[in-house]
Amino acid sequence: MSRRLAALIPFYEFDEAQFFRADNAPDEVAASRRAGFTRLAQHYQQRFAKTRALTTEVRDSLSDLQFTSTYRVPFQFSRVVRENLSAGSFLQSSSGVTLTDLDGNTFYDLTGSYGVNVFGYDFYKACMETGARRVQDLGPVLGAFHPVLAYNVERLTQISGLDEVSFHMSGTEAVMQAVRLARYHTRRTHLVRFCGAYHGWWGDVQPGVGNPLPARETYTLKEMSADTLHVLRTRRDIACVLVNPLQALHPNASAPADSALVDSSRGAHFDRQAYTAWLQELRKVCDARGIVLIFDEVFVGFRLAPGGAQEYFGVRADLVTYGKTLGGGLPIGVVCGRKHLMKRYRDDRPVDVCFARGTFNSHPYVMGAMHEFLRRLDDADIRAVYDNLDEVWNERARGLNQRLRDEGLPVQVANLSSIWTVTYTQPSRYNWMLQYYLRAEGLALSWIGTGRLIFSLNYTDADFQAVADCFVAAARTMHQDGWWWADASGRAKPIKRLILQEMARHVFAGRPRQAASAA
Ligand SMILES: Cc1ncc(COP(=O)(O)O)c(C=O)c1O
């Protein structure tokens, strides 16, 4: 359905005049926005000159960059924003909780490197350096293992509480392998994933927009729903249920990218008790039906607790995937699982095997960095960051929300520990502008913008206060510049209606042209 809808939405974009009053704001508001935008554009041009120049140089030959720079904001605004508010995509260095670009600008890092950065970049630099020294005599030899692997296996079985481990090159591959094993051992075809949950970019776990083919052996079900439990209780073709515990922050919603932030309907709220109860229900029904319960902890593993989501929610899975941070700064995917599920052959059918390979699996340098990561997990300073972890981050979120409320700014944050989402409290078509004001204040966000702020756990109270000051200052300036002007009704509906009307106009305007070109 979502793929069909996506195919119907026509491209159109706003010209300079429409750009500032896409919500039919009055002229004086549009003028104030234009002035703010011009000021910001000048700031970006001066401050990020070198970083932008290199970005422009490679953009036409780097597909990834073209995609991310196009999809930072809703497509109607994208070109004008890209041409004026690019901060560039290169960085020179990292230190503490900051990143420095090619122009020497230093930013607080809220990108978290897609979640890899749990303990601070210096921690990973040390893991990579020490790990590399440990394995350098073996170098890039593959197939046989460096001895550091033995320690990694031992630690991972302890941490996961599971019997066996397999190493892969990315989180996507770990998920592929976990699902393949579940299908092999249950002799059933289908996987269950939940609405909005990301499990990497493999076709079977990404059945909607973004995958040109339909995923035929995937059921996408509603999370925290009795209907889902009913499906699991009654269908006979379900091999496994994939859970991404990050969804606890926004069950059934996709990763909250600013490109989809067309009004203010983004919501997020983490209820630990309710999500724990849901996982317990899933555990029960999977046990009763012989379905393999897979926790995909590629994102949250080691971030919520040393033992990951299993420990945090107190529910055990049959297979667990890890990735990101566990590589100690290098690429990784790991599956941990119960013995009978990890086995790749059948004793009674020697030719019926479950194949899994990968040239670079167990690469000595990755194993070296992981060894260091796992070793350092026991250090007192690392153990200490887990003390009162939720209290610390909940209190920081609460404090920031209070400041935003006190200033009458229509912005709030919701958090699952150190993973945050920005939400907007009044209807607006321009919320995505906040990411550009934040950057100007010295906060670096990933390309999906304000939907995902990821803090590393080495943020001190002072670091956080500096971030909060920047955040409030950015929202204040954006407010003063008029981007949050609201239609008198104060409802979101007029914005949605406006967008639908725009799209309909462009669909109909496009028809004769298509017919003419077909003729
Ligand atoms: C929960 C989850 N699973 C799997 C993946 C895919 O991992 P990778 O990008 O290493 O392939 C991700 C990546 O963000 C993820 O968050």
Image: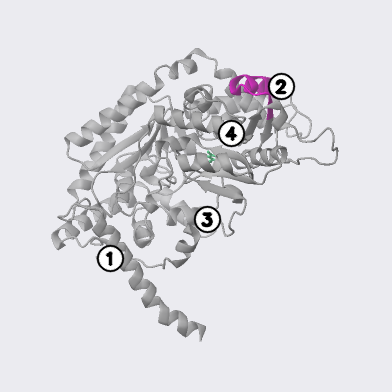
The boundaries of the magenta stretch are 149-165
SS type, badge 1? helix
Earlier sequence position, callout 2 versus callout 4: 2
Colour scheme employed for the rendering of this structure = one colour
Mark 2 is on which residue type? Ala
Magenta: predominant secondary structure element? helix
Earlier sequence position, callout 3 versus callout 1: 1
Residue 177 sits inside the magenta stretch: no
Earlier sequence position, callout 2 versus callout 1: 1
Q: Would you say 517 lies left or right of 336 here?
A: left
Q: Nearer the viewer, residue 167 or 97?
A: 167
Residue 336: tell me if it is visible.
yes
Placement of 355 over or under 381, stated as above or below: below
Marks 2, 4: nearer the viewer: 4
Q: Residue at x 55, y 35 (%)?
A: 298
Packing grade of label 3 (10 A; few <14, some 14-19, many >=20) is few
Residue 241's x, y, as percent? Answer: 57, 39
Which labelled disc corresponds to residue 286? Answer: 4
Q: Would you say 313 lies left or right of 13 here?
A: right
SS type, badge 4? helix
Q: Which residue is mark 3?
A: 210
Q: Residue at x 45, y 28 (%)?
A: 276
SS type, badge 3? loop
Tags 2 and 1 touching, CB below 8 Å: no
Q: CA distance from mark 2 to mark 3?
A: 39 Å
Residue 341 occupies quadrant = top right
Q: Which residue is mark 1?
A: 16
Tags 2 and 4 touching, CB below 8 Å: no
Placement of 445 over or under 27, stated as above or below: above
Packing grade of label 2 (10 A; few <14, some 14-19, many >=20) is few
